[in-house]
Amino acid sequence: MFNRFFGQKPQEDPKRDENTESVPEQRFNFLSRTKQLFSRVSNVIKQSDTISDTLWDDLEEELLAADVGPSTSAWLIERLRQRATDEHMRTSSQVQRALREELVTLLGKPAPLRFSNQSPLTVILIIGVNGSGKTTSIAKLAYRLTREGHHVTLAAADTFRAAAIDQLKEWGNRIDVPVISQNPGSDPAAVVYDAIQAAQNRGSDVLIVDTAGRLHTKHNLMEELKKMSKVIQKFIADGPHELLVVIDATTGQNALLQARKFAEDIGLTGVIITKLDSTAKGGFAFAVADDLGVPIKFIGTGEKVENLAPFEPQSFVAALFAQD
């Protein structure tokens, strides 16, 4: 139901806010902790006199330390082994270059937000467990989209917690974006119904929906999302256009298990990774891309509202090895 692919709506002369920074512009500060671990990955390769089993074992150990994950690390090592044989590698620089290429390939191509090609209104659903940075990411995304010339409305469909509604309203006031809400405990689908009508009446072209941040083991959340989807499709046949899960990088592989359950049960179109600036284990991004099979759309690069960057795989990998 949720896994639909739509073309990106063309934007005419989009505005670019001077504070809205991309990965290349911020890579030397928000990835500083992760770069320390990836420098160890580089050193293992550089200090190896021969391309041997010892090199592969040591390299896999450092990838695991950077939170790339067991299965992803094993896959990378196997790929490098095969390439070393096929390409008759003799030097550490050849291995280093191959590793970078495989990491970029693993992350896939840049994946911008998908906008409806059938309706003036694009609907984006955001899910994630409590504490992942979900509501803050919604505010950052809304802020970014408004700076690009979009007219955004927010829907407070996380009615399970009164604090979630209040938090989204506070963010809405700060970034001057309207928030549609009802009382705590209300039917989330009813909030979405009101929000779609309000967004259409206001002339908004993007509606971002905050959903309950319960753990993936809660059956009710899955049913709520299905019900919200049905409501959306009554108004907009090709909606929802994005279903993004927010993952906290500081929780590493545990967060990946939660996201995998979301992906299996309801389908995802992309990922937002938060708090990459607060962890040394940014290699987690590779495990996310490999395990979930959906693109990383955005990454959180700091605490400010402008600190949300479109994910650019090639720039991300270049940043990790910037001091090589």
Image (spheres, helix red, strand yellow):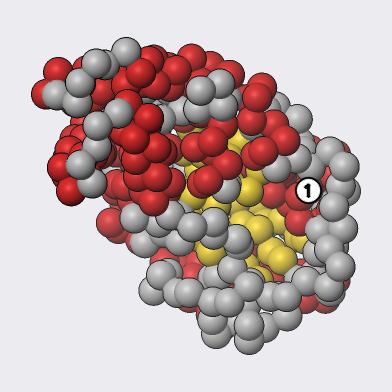
Left or right of residue 284, residue 119 in this image: right
Q: Secondary structure at mark 1?
A: helix
Where is residue 194 drawn, in percent x and y? 69, 68
Where is residue 106 drawn, in percent x and y? 36, 48
Using the image, determine if residue 238 lies above or below residue 71. below
> Which residue carries the number 1 mark?
143
Where is residue 174 drawn, in percent x and y? 85, 39
Question: Taking the image as drawn, is residue 276 in sight?
Answer: no
- Count up the numbered dots: 1
Left or right of residue 317, residue 258 in this image: left
Left or right of residue 76, residue 126 in this image: right
The image quarter in which residue 99 lies: top left
Question: Taking the image as drawn, is residue 17 in sight?
Answer: yes
Residue sitting at 19 percent across and 26 percent down?
A: 51
| Camera-side residue of 69 and 212 | 69
Quarter of the image where the N terminus is located: bottom left
| Camera-side residue of 102 and 247 | 102
Left or right of residue 175, residue 42 in this image: left
Mark 1: give few (<14), some (14-19) or many (20+) Cα within 10 Å. many
Residue sitting at 62 percent across and 77 percent down?
A: 116
Residue sitting at 75 percent across and 30 percent down?
A: 304
| Camera-side residue of 40 and 250 | 40
Residue extending farthest left: 53
Q: Amino acid at mark 1?
A: Tyr
Using the image, determine if residue 150 lies above or below residue 51. below
Residue sitting at 58 percent across and 77 percent down?
A: 7
Using the image, determine if residue 229 lies above or below residue 126. below
Where is residue 91 drawn, in percent x and y? 30, 28
